[in-house]
Image (tube, helix red, strand yellow):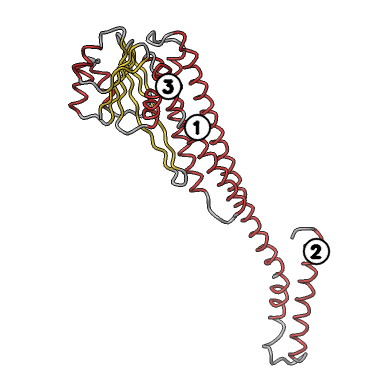
Amino acid sequence: MLRSFIFSQGKLIYQDPGLEVLRLVLYDDDVQLWVDMENPTAQENKEVLEGVFNFHPLAIEDCVTLSERPKADEYDNYIFLVVHAMNYVAGKHELTTSELNLFIGKNFLVTCHCEPLRCVMATIERVRKNAPLVARAPDRLTYHLLDALLDQYEPAMEALSTEIEQLEHRVLAAHAANHIGNVVTLKGVVQKMRQIVLPQREVIARVAHGEFKIVRAHLLPYFRDLLDRLAHINDMADNDREALTGVLQVHLNLQQMQINQIIKVLTVLATLALPILAVTSYYGMNIQHMPNTDWPPWPYAYAWILGMILLWTSLIWWWIKKKGWY
């Protein structure tokens, strides 16, 4: 799908013209273009990226090839950015990313992406409602696109934080359940988020610090605001990682406490069984063959043996309770 918008002094004057019109107005300094390419075909890439804008072959190659890392490259009269939108499905522990490629020139912006992006659709709606506020220039339009893109990050981070909090409650409420798999899965999600956010910070930092002259100086504070938001998101990811480490440690400690309790019970039972072993072993050698005994009669032998066992078992149990060992 190919969408195109032509602006003059921030006002939307034409939408979805043909490629010939785009070629004609591209070199008009009083006109700004925004071309959005959603899931473009190879023919559309060739016609727009090469035929209309004549972008560098390496930039086109990076655009049509999916990349897992954000990047920023500067060419003669434009810069090429690769950023990623993020979506997290709570409950399924699924983190997905969508690549957004931007060619930012003095009077044009070309965006290319394989999947529908909410940030692009939200920006298009804002352009249609109030174009002078959003699309006064390509660098300002780029800021609004990136701002809408980061708006998707915070709900994803909040959903993940909520899942971690719920997992912590489940760990404390059900000691016997094995939550290690959930913890490891969520740690993998957090690590993937950090792998997205950290390189993105580097790219936005290069723009915010004025490395690219395409972005005008009075817009740099806006990009620095995006950088601050990314720093906050990164801090949230770090906090989630530490929280998961704490949950894992608590889970392992609870399991160890449960094992220690089992060992404690078994130790007490083994200790209480010592009189039985001692008495029966001793009298097993001194009573010929019960119940037929010469002296004393076998009922008294049984009573004597059981009495000895109960006496010593009771004394051991009293001693254990007195010491507070159980």
Amino acid carrying mark 2 in the image: Trp
Q: Secondary structure at mark 2?
A: helix
Q: Earlier in the sequence, mark 3 or mark 1?
A: 3
Work out whether residue 128 or residue 86 is closer to the camera in this orientation and state it.
Answer: 128
- Say which residue label 2 marks: 319
Work out whether residue 270 or residue 243 is closer to the camera in this orientation and state it.
Answer: 243
Work out whether residue 227 or residue 290 is closer to the camera in this orientation and state it.
Answer: 227
Tag nearer the camera, 2 or 3: 3
Q: Earlier in the sequence, mark 2 or mark 3?
A: 3
Spatial CA distance of label 3 from label 1 is 16 Å
- Say which residue label 3 marks: 144
Residue 144, image x, y percentages: 42, 21
Residue 84, image x, y percentages: 38, 28
- Say which residue label 1 marks: 154
Q: Is residue 19 above or below residue 176?
A: above
Work out whether residue 118 or residue 131 is closer to the camera in this orientation and state it.
Answer: 131
Amino acid carrying mark 3 in the image: His
The residue at 66%/58% (across/down) is 261
Would residue 91 be found to the left or right of residue 306 on screen?
A: left
Q: Are marks 2 and 3 in contact (CB under 8 Å)?
A: no
- Label 3: how many Cα within 10 Å (few below 14, some 14–19, many 20+): many
The residue at 73%/76% (across/down) is 279
Tag nearer the camera, 3 or 1: 3
- Label 1: how many Cα within 10 Å (few below 14, some 14–19, many 20+): some
Q: Earlier in the sequence, mark 1 or mark 2?
A: 1
Q: Quadrant of the C terminus?
A: bottom right
The residue at 53%/50% (across/down) is 179
Q: Are marks 1 and 2 in contact (CB under 8 Å)?
A: no
Would you identify the image quadrant in which residue 5 lies? top left
